[in-house]
Amino acid sequence: MKEEIIFKEDSKIKVKKPKMYKVILHNDDYTTMEFVIEVLVMVFNKKPAEASKIMYDVHKRGIGIAGVYSYDIATTKIAQVMDMAEKSGFPLKLSMEEE
């Protein structure tokens, strides 16, 4: 008679949510307000009114939060903006911090 072996596996798999990062725009004396709004609309998919509010935060407070993203998306968006800024001749600075 053949003996049957049965294995029981614990099928509970825990999936961690990825850490999220704030992408922060920093104020400078050279980058135009129009360019900041353009970046927020084109790269961060903000509506013009929301982009203007973030731009005024940057202007008045020194920083503004462009959005909150996973690490890979945040770094990609920062790279896109830095490329746009460099091509346009602006020293726009961005950073990211864990939320």
Image: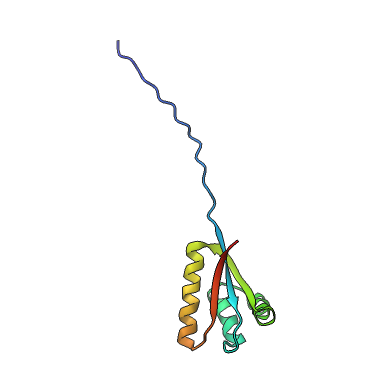
Instruction: Give the residue at x 54% y 75%.
Output: 94
Give the total of numbered labels: 0
32 above or below 43? below
Residue 81: x %, y % from top left: 50, 77
83 above or below 89? above
Instruction: Give the residue at x 52% y 85%.
Output: 91
Closer to the camera in the image, 78 or 63:
63
Residue 48 in which image quadrant: bottom right
Residue 57: x %, y % from top left: 68, 77
Instruction: Give the residue at x 60% y 88%.
Output: 29
- 15 to the left or right of 47: left
Colour logic: rainbow
Determine the residue located farthest toward the top in the rendered image: 1
Which image quarter is the N terminus in?
top left
Residue 73: x %, y % from top left: 49, 65
Closer to the camera in the image, 7 or 47:
7
Closer to the camera in the image, 34 or 70:
70
Residue 51 in which image quadrant: bottom right
Which image quarter is the C terminus in?
bottom right
Residue 95: x %, y % from top left: 54, 72
